[in-house]
Image: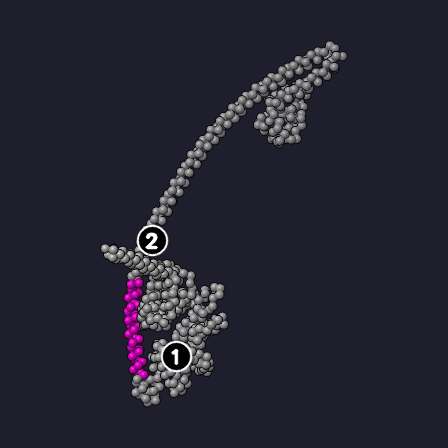
Amino acid sequence: MKKITSYKTAYYQLTSMLVLFFVFIHGNVNAQSSIKNTQKDSISYYTSKISRALNQANLPQYIAYKDLQRSALFFKNAKHYDRVVQCLLTMADIQKKKGKMSLSFDHLWEGLYWVEKTENDTYKAILHRKLSQLYDAFNKQEKSLFHSEQALVFSKKLLLKKNKQPVQLNSSYLNLAVKQRKLKNYDKAHSYLDSCAAFQNQIKTSSYVTFGVVMERATIYLLQNDYKNANRILQTTKRKHLDKNAKQDIRIYYNLGLLKLHLKEQDSAVYYFEKSLKLINTSHTEKNLSPQLLGPLSEIYFSKNKAKKAYSFLRQKNKIADSLTQIKTEVYSELFEIKNSYLATLQEKESILSQKNSIIEKNEQTQFWLKIIIVLVLILGSALFFISRIRLKLKKTILEKKEAALESKLSKEKSKAKIKLKSKELTSYALQLIDKDSAIDELLKVLKEAEPSSYKSLSNKHKKGAADLWDEFNLRFTEVNLDFYKRLKVKHPNFTPTEQKHLALIKLKFSTKEMARILNIEPHSVHISRSRIRKKIGLERNDSLEDYVNDL
């Protein structure tokens, strides 16, 4: 029993240990897988994938292409558009090398879409330049030239930025030089190459562009039959660059072969052409040059009566030419399909956009008219409010004016009545004075006859009293007719005080005798004074002095 119990205990212990070990291993595996999954979703992971894909010498093309596809998708979602464009550029190069031009076009056009979301002028220049080269391969010179010029625009922008070397600018100038050379505009081509030379000193490291500029210059000299300059450039380039790069060696041998062919040195031409062709076959690069090498070789061997070899080269050339024609046909059909689908997509998008734009435009028009209506209502309301206020003010002003006019009229009527009353009082007072003076004069006459000694003193007293009475009368007249004297002074400032008295009495409509009596003068003197007054005023004989004075 004890043994059985000990076995059971050992069994349970072993089982628990195995379970704990399994849990530990399972947890560790899950942790590692989660770390790996996290790493797979990181920017650094896909950046390293791109770096590995760019180094295609150590990686098969199909694996590199798949890695670039996955990386592009990740960076699209992460909105790292520079990386997306970098992937698409490399994918386009891979498809071009495989001869699938339509896919290369597709990647480059997609790259143009994504690069617009960045400020990377380097990628913009490269994309346009690669599109130019693809169009050039299919003799679409107009489109090729357009993209070359676009590449130049962005390359110039790059040069204006700080610490930027003119590598892209020289690449664009070289590309344009090739276009102009193919169009037989040799002077323009030389000018673009001169532009490359002007910026060459600013490039710190030598590049394929530098070699391309030299080779393009030599090619143009060959086409212009300037064999001396072409030979000088090619010999110098041969000494500097030969046996360093397969692509460069192919171009050097090919151009040397052309030079020798132009110089009618057939053996040397064959030597260089065959060297170039051999490098193409061993390095699997620059295959597009094969027909251009096989044609001249076939002609040279035919001229040497080596028909078998000439026929062999001619057959190879035709085979490659037929293959390229087929590829171009397939590419064109694919491109047309892409173009049609692209146009269909564009038309669909444009239709949706036009519908949205029409809705937006209608909404904007509705909002615009609503705003105008609201503004008009506000203006109309404000206008009505101000008009009602102005009308009330006008009514108030008219009533006030009417009241003021009525008050003024009543005041004038009162004043006139008062003046009329006072004038009557003055007239009555003056008449009383005249009657009193008449009675006093009669008494003085009696006194003069009865008692001449007392007459003189009483007469003087009477004259003084008469003068005082006149002053009192004049004061009362002035109180009643204050404006009369003011207007008289303004209109006729040269009247004497005596003449003013005469005019005041005329105003009160006294007769000549009454005036003479009041003024204590003879009636004849009154007539003389009146005549003088008429002259000063300038009245005619028929004009009435009384009317003139009353109008004052």
Q: Nearer the viewer, residue 271 or 457?
A: 271
Q: Is residue 380 shown above or below 41?
A: above
Q: Residue 245: name its quadrant.
A: bottom left
Residue 219: percent from the left, percent from the top?
A: 42, 78
Residue 318 lies in magenta, yes or no?
yes
- Answer whether residue 202 is visible to the viewer in this image: yes
- Answer whether residue 37 is visible to the viewer in this image: no
Q: The C terminus is located in which quarter?
A: top right
Q: Is residue 255 shown above or below 360?
A: below
Residue matched to label 2: 357
Q: Which of 525 and 391 is in front in this view?
A: 391
Residue 43: percent from the left, percent from the top?
A: 38, 61
Residue 189 lies in magenta, yes or no?
no
- The label number, if any, that marks residue 472 in the structure image: none
Q: What stretch is highlighted in magenta?
A: 313-342
Residue 394: percent from the left, percent from the top?
A: 46, 32
Q: Which residue is drawn at 40% across and 42% down?
A: 375
- The label number, if any, that marks residue 250 in the structure image: 1
Q: Is residue 175 shown above or below 272?
A: above
Q: Which of marks 2 and 1 is nearer the N terminus?
A: 1
